[in-house]
């Protein structure tokens, strides 16, 4: 393809013949004609291009890369218009690179790109420099010279001889090329000047670039002046302040350090501290008087005295001892939680009769979201005391409790003393949150440090390492919270009164949502209660199918989600329908919250063989637990599946041993277990399960499968089994009975030892369930299996034992 086919009408008059030149790609630089520039060349192909040029006429084509990061550019990576330059001088450096001095000769356009393995070449045509002799051209040249002189005067460090050399240039194009080399403009702007063949067009673009740079330099000069004035003012203020301090020091009677000592002495004298603390403060003050005020030790002593004077020693708030008023506050703030409220009222009653009682240590234990922390705040409000909360989650350093010794840099008291200073009185309600989340490492055991804090016999002389004097904590009402007791050391548990908060029933959650959560979320989202009606069946739908928890945090989040969607809808329609009301029933929950996330267990509709329903306790409440048993031909192997823990696996072994010991009563052969394999499975195998309350359920399912007797589908059971068949007590009875009622079960077998716990179960749960206490496994089978137990079995060889569907003959 000839070069003339790609040229414009203007360029056709300035193109000469084609010639092949070695190609040198340039990064971050554009070389103009008559411009002498040193370059450092390191790429292999570029070095080969220099060597090829040196072998000939020293000419090569200089083209700038569009992206300087590319190491091996192609034709698309290079600008088409470049400069033919001549090598003036070349020097090889020790590191393998080459320093070359190149002089630009003439503009050229690359017509073809030749890529070889050893070097790059460009088939290019030279562009003749056009002349310009019009008055417009003269005016542009004068404007460029004046603007460039202004540009230099604004602070650009350009040698004065540059202006002198520009004065001798009479060619318009040459003037533009010489000026642009000294401007701080981008590569794209330089390339635009290079590609301007008409001198008039080139001068116009150059003048626009210079004016833009002048405007930027003027703004920079203004900013520098403003910053300089601000710095001078700051330095002046600092100098005057230092002079003032020096004058006051010379006067003597206004010495800041002496004034500080006098203030400390007055504060120590007026502060009502213990005798030991007052003596310690006086001793430290005497030391401080003999120290240099600028010494590091003086800073430590000042900090220590500040802490001694800031914590409350004898200051206390007047507690409210009105039992009726306290009960009212607790009832307003919390629904249910009768045990905790009863304990607080008892404490108030004793306080009203006795002037001094050592502060009790209460520990509220329960799942997340049941209101343990907020209950502590309500207790403080009921007692009219200050409330302080510290979180012990993740604390693993003993010094966090007892404080650091003053020998350490940055020493400070522990969280207990810090909390007392925050309270400002010596009888606050002090909440130790997440006491079960503490851990231990090489820095000590913080739970052991709490032993002194939480012991009513010792905390009157609590010793903080930083204070180094005894501090009285006996007036503080400590309330600790924990999710589980297992991770709290025994000695620490022994010092606390444990109050369990098992979680809320569905009715309690409904009342909490109705009394507290719904109004709170409506107010938080700007919704008026009279315009929103949420029915009870909608709340039950949210509780049962969108949350799975013992507390109410997830319930509150779901209510907030509904309120957000109502608020969004209200903003959209308030201009069209300003009085819109919202009525949320069970059917309307799904459009707001999406597909239900949880499906609570439900009872089987018909009696089945080898399948029994148990009850389990989880951290988010009770659940029903289906246990299935299959009898297979085999050799006596027992398989237990369902991701069970060690306790449940041992329960399965105990259940099998019990059934084997009752072979005659169940109508089985004495060696039945040697001819079969038994598979016990608990569905939902991805969920870990463990606990000592599935023994009688496993034994029932096993007895049903072996005897071919059906288990009642409306019956659930819970309890552990011994080898002799005795049914042992379990925990979490309230949650388990709630799960049974939710699943639609009618009867529940519980250990007789747990009959006393029925007093703690709400009456609305017991009204829908028939609870049958049992002492022995025989009673369980009598109630669970669908017909009387067989006494004999037909003689003969029963290979493989009894399958799940076989019938036992009398």
Image (tube, rainbow, N blue to C red):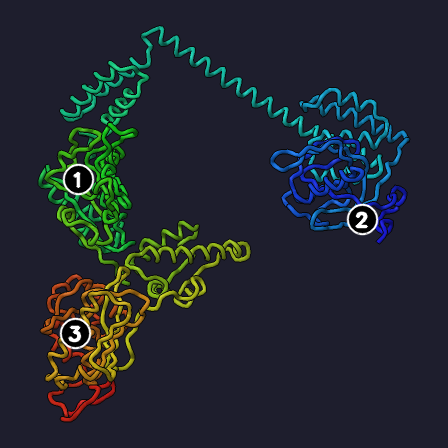
The residues tagged by marks 3 and 1 sit, at their Cα atoms, a distance apart of 47 Å
Whether residue 384 is visible here, answered yes or no, is no
Q: Residues under labels 1 and 2: Cα distance? A: 89 Å
Q: Residues within 10 Å of mark 1 (few under 14, many from 20)?
A: many
- What residue is shown at x 28% (from left), y 75% (from top)? 603
Q: Nearer the viewer, mark 3 or mark 2?
A: 2
Q: Which label is found at residue 111?
A: 2
Left or right? Give the position of 271 relative to 581.
left
Callout 1: SS = helix
Please rate how many residues cluster around mark 3, counting C-alpha atoms within 10 Å: few if below 14, some from 14 to 19, many from 20.
Answer: many
Q: Position of residue 799 (x, y in %)?
A: 20, 89
Q: Which residue appears farthest toward the front when viewing the image?
A: 55
Mark 2: which secondary structure?
A: strand
Q: Which residue is label 1 attached to? A: 453
Q: Which residue is mark 3?
A: 655
Q: Position of residue 251 (x, y in %)?
A: 35, 6
Q: Is residue 654 above or below residue 151?
A: below
> Residue 514: x and y, percent?
32, 57
Answer with mark 3 or mark 2, whichever residue precedes in sequence: 2
């Amino acid at each position: 393809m000839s070069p003339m086919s790609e040229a414009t009408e203007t360029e056709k008059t300035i193109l000469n013949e084609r010639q092949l030149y070695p190609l040198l790609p340039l990064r971050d630089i554009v070389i103009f004609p008559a411009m002498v520039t040193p370059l450092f060349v390191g790429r292999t192909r570029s070095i080969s291009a220099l060597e090829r040029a040196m072998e000939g006429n020293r000419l090569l084509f200089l083209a700038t890369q569009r992206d300087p990061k590319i190491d091996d550019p192609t034709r698309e990576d290079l600008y088409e218009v470049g400069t033919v330059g001549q090598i003036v001088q070349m020097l090889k450096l020790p590191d393998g690179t080459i320093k070359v001095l190149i002089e630009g000769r003439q503009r050229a356009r690359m017509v073809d790109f030749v890529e070889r393995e050893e070097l790059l070449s460009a088939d290019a045509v030279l562009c003749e420099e056009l002349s310009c002799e019009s008055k417009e051209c003269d005016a542009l040249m004068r404007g460029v010279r004046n603007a460039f002189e202004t540009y230099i005067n604004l602070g650009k460090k350009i040698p004065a001889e540059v202006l002198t050399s520009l004065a001798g240039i009479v060619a318009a194009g040459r003037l533009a090329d010489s000026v642009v080399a000294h401007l701080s403009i981008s590569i794209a702007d330089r390339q635009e000047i290079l590609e301007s063949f008409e001198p008039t067009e080139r001068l116009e673009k150059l003048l626009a670039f210079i004016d833009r740079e002048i405007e930027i330099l003027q703004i920079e000069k203004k900013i520098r002046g403003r910053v300089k004035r601000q710095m001078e003012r700051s330095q002046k203020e600092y100098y005057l302040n230092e002079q003032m301090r020096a004058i006051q020091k010379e006067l003597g009677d206004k010495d800041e350090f002496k004034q500080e000592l006098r203030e400390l002495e007055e504060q120590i004298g007026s502060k009502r501290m213990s005798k030991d603390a007052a003596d310690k403060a006086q001793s430290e003050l005497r030391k401080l008087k003999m120290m240099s005020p600028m010494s590091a030790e003086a800073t430590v002593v000042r900090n220590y005295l500040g802490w001694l004077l800031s914590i409350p020693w004898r200051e206390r708030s007047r507690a409210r001892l009105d039992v009726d008023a306290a009960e009212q506050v607790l009832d307003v703030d919390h629904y249910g939680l009768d045990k905790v409220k009863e304990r607080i009222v008892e404490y108030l009653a004793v306080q009203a009769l006795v002037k001094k009682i050592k502060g009790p240590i209460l520990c509220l234990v329960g799942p997340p979201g049941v209101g343990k922390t907020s209950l502590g705040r309500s207790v403080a409000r009921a007692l009219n005391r200050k409330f302080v909360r510290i979180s012990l989650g993740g604390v693993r350093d003993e010094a966090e409790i007892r404080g650091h010794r003053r020998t350490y840099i940055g020493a400070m008291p522990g969280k207990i003393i810090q909390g007392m200073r925050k309270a400002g009185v010596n009888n606050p309600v002090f909440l130790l949150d997440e006491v079960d989340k503490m851990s231990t490492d090489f820095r000590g055991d913080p739970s052991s440090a709490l032993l002194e804090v939480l012991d009513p016999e010792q905390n009157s002389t609590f010793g903080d390492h930083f204070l180094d004097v005894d501090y009285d904590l006996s007036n503080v009402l400590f309330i600790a919270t924990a999710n589980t007791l297992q991770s709290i050391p025994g000695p620490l548990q022994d010092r606390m009164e444990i109050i369990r908060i098992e979680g809320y029933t569905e009715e309690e959650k409904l009342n909490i949502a109705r009394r507290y959560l719904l109004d709170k979320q409506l107010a938080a989202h700007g919704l008026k209660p009279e315009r929103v009606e949420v029915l009870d069946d909608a709340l039950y739908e949210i509780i049962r199918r969108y949350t799975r928890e013992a507390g109410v945090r997830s319930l509150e989040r779901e209510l907030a989600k509904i309120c957000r969607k109502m608020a969004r809808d209200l903003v959209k329609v308030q201009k069209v329908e300003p009085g819109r009301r919202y009525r949320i029933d069970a059917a309307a929950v799904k459009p707001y919250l999406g597909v239900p996330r949880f499906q609570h267990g439900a009872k089987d509709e018909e009696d089945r063989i080898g399948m029994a329903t148990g009850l389990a306790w989880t951290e988010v409440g009770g659940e029903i637990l289906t246990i299935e048993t299959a009898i297979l031909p085999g050799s006596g192997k027992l398989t237990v599946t369902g991701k069970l823990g060690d306790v449940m696996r041992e329960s399965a072994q105990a259940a099998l041993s019990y059934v084997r010991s009752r072979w005659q009563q169940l109508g089985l052969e004495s060696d039945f277990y040697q001819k079969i394999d038994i598979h016990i499975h608990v569905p939902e195998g991805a969920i870990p399960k463990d606990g000592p309350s599935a023994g009688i359920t496993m034994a029932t399912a096993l007895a049903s499968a072996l005897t071919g007797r059906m288990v009642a589908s409306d019956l659930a059971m819970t309890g552990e089994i011994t080898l002799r068949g005795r049914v042992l007590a379990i925990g979490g009875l309230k949650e388990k009975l709630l799960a049974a009622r939710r699943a639609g079960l009618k009867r529940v077998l519980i250990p007789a030892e747990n009959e006393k716990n029925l007093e703690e179960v709400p009456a609305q749960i017991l009204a829908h369930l028939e609870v049958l206490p049992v002492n022995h496994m025989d009673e369980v089978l009598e109630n669970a299996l669908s017909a009387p137990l067989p006494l004999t079995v037909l003689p003969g060889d029963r290979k493989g034992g009894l399958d799940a569907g076989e019938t036992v003959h009398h």
